Amino acid sequence: MTTLLIATRNAHKVAEIRALLSGQCACLSQNDLPEAPTIVEDEINFAGNARKKAEGLAAWIGDHSPLANCAPEFILADDSGLEVDALGGAPGVHSARFAAEEISGSANAPDAANNAKLLRLLAGVPLERRGARFRCALALAPLRAAAKAGSTTLFEGSCEGRIALAPAGAGGFGYDPLFVPDGWNQSLAELGESVKNTMSHRARALRQLREFLLQRG
């Protein structure tokens, strides 16, 4: 079984990735490395941020050897977010910190604040103009070859939908209560994890990752 270290401390994201890779990968997370640095996400797109996080954490582990007894084969980093057509693609790579400037001293913003800001900006925009998509980029960096050019593999997925007029549902996280995927009349937060994991942007990217790992043998 392949061992991955997921480059995030986001418990929701870790649980989702573990569920989608169940049976094929053993997944550690950055919560198992409390001393590891937080990699600044300052690239212009999701793929750039994912690659930077995966390779940055791999390089740090290589220098510090904190996982000598259970070193993973790969570092897996995810960067994902929401693009809203009526907002010119915003919040995009700023999805997690969309409302951060309104909350003093916060790098990221609480989900409720991000959702509230999105609804304020879309006030008066009719449903037919509230098209949006979730995008996910995954970067898989081999721990022992992270510094080698071309050693990181990227996988990407998207999920098309629209932004509802009001949040609905208690499941999921992030913008899930506002995002209604194409072909459905319920938000991702209402549809629940089992349905979300068949169609989400992250699920689609992780399916590509699973295939890649299977082909490796």
Image (spheres, rainbow, N blue to C red):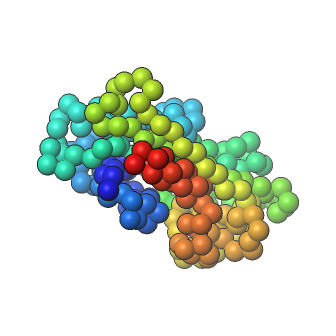
In percent of width and height, residue 110 lies at: 48, 59
Q: Residue at x 54, y 50 (%)?
A: 208
Residue 123 showing in the rendered view: yes
Q: Residue at x 67, y 48 (%)?
A: 83
Quadrant holding the N terminus = bottom left
In percent of width and height, residue 95 lies at: 56, 49
Residue 50 showing in the rendered view: no
Q: How many marks?
A: 0
Q: Residue at x 40, y 48 (%)?
A: 217
Q: Is residue 62 left or right of residue 114?
A: left
Query: 187 and 197: which one is in front?
Result: 197
Query: 159 and 90: which one is in front?
Result: 159
In percent of width and height, residue 196 lies at: 58, 68
Q: Is residue 133 left or right of residue 174?
A: right
In percent of width and height, residue 16 lies at: 45, 63
Query: 154 and 191: which one is in front?
Result: 154
Q: Residue at x 60, y 60 (%)?
A: 200
